[in-house]
Image (cartoon, rainbow, N blue to C red):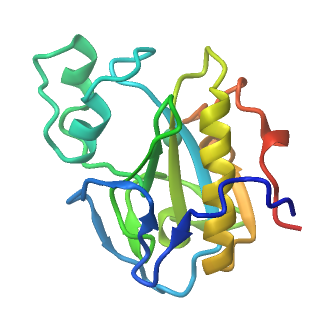
Amino acid sequence: MSHTANTTLQIDADGFANPAQMVLSPNQDVRPDPADIAMIVIHNISLPPNQYGGPGIVQLFTNQLDSQAHPYYAEIAHLQVSSHFLIRRNGELMQFVSCLQRAWHAGLSQWQGRERCNDFSIGIELEGSDFEAFEADQYRTLQALIEALRQRYPIKHIVGHSDIAPGRKTDPGPFFEWQRISQPD
Ligand SMILES: [Zn+2]
C-alpha cells in the first residue's frame, strides 16, 4: 500500500473526516452493526446531469432540491438519499453522514450474497458522470480518503455502485480508473 497521498486526512472516533466540509444530511439512520463497516462503494453524481459546481447535490442530500429548478429535478426531488462523502471536481471533500451511521446511497443492492449494502458500506460520490474523465485532484482526495478509512475500519472490498446494483446503476462509469486506487488485499 502506498502512502504518497495526503497523510493529514484522518477519520476521527466519531466517524468524521478531517479536513472536510461538513453538511449533515437528515437521510441517515443507525447501522444494524456499527462495527461492520466492510465495504466502500464508489459513485458518480452531477446535478443537473453533466454540470458541475452547482448546489444541486448538496440540496438533494439535504432534501432542499427545488423540483422547479430543472426538469430532471422534478423526477428526483422527492428522493431521500445521501452519501457519506462527496468529492468535488477540485478535490474538495464534503461529508454528510458520520461513517458510524448508515447513509442512503446504495439502494436495492447485493454483494457476494449480502443484500442491503448500505448496512455495511461507506458511500463516496465523485462529482462527475459516466461520460467524462474524473480529475486528478479527485483521485488524490479519493486515495487519501480510502487510506484514512482503512486505518479506522476493516474495509475488505472497494466496489462501484454498478457492481452491487447491476442493470439498475451504471456509476461510477467507464471513465473511472480503478487502477488509480489501491484495493485491499
Ligand atoms: Zn450511485
Q: Is residue 160 visible?
A: no
Quarter of the image where one finds residue 38: bottom right
> Which residue is at the front of the view, 19 or 45?
19
Q: Is residue 90 visible?
A: yes
Which quadrant of the rendered structure holds the N terminus? bottom right
94 lies above or below 92:
below
Q: Position of residue 171 (x, y in %)?
A: 59, 34
Left or right: 23 as drawn, with respect to 182: left
Residue at left offset 45%, top offset 52%: 85
Left or right: 155 as drawn, with respect to 44: right
Residue at left offset 57%, top offset 82%: 36
Quarter of the image where one finds residue 185: bottom right
Residue at left offset 10%, top offset 17%: 68
88 lies above or below 1:
above
> Which residue is at the front of the view, 82 or 112?
82
Quarter of the image where one finds residue 168: top right
Q: Position of residue 123 (x, y in %)?
A: 51, 55
- For the image shown, how many numbered marks are present on the structure? 0
Q: Position of residue 99 (x, y in %)?
A: 45, 70
Q: Position of residue 17 (x, y in %)?
A: 46, 65
> Which residue is at the front of the view, 105 or 100?
100
Residue at left offset 67%, top offset 30%: 136
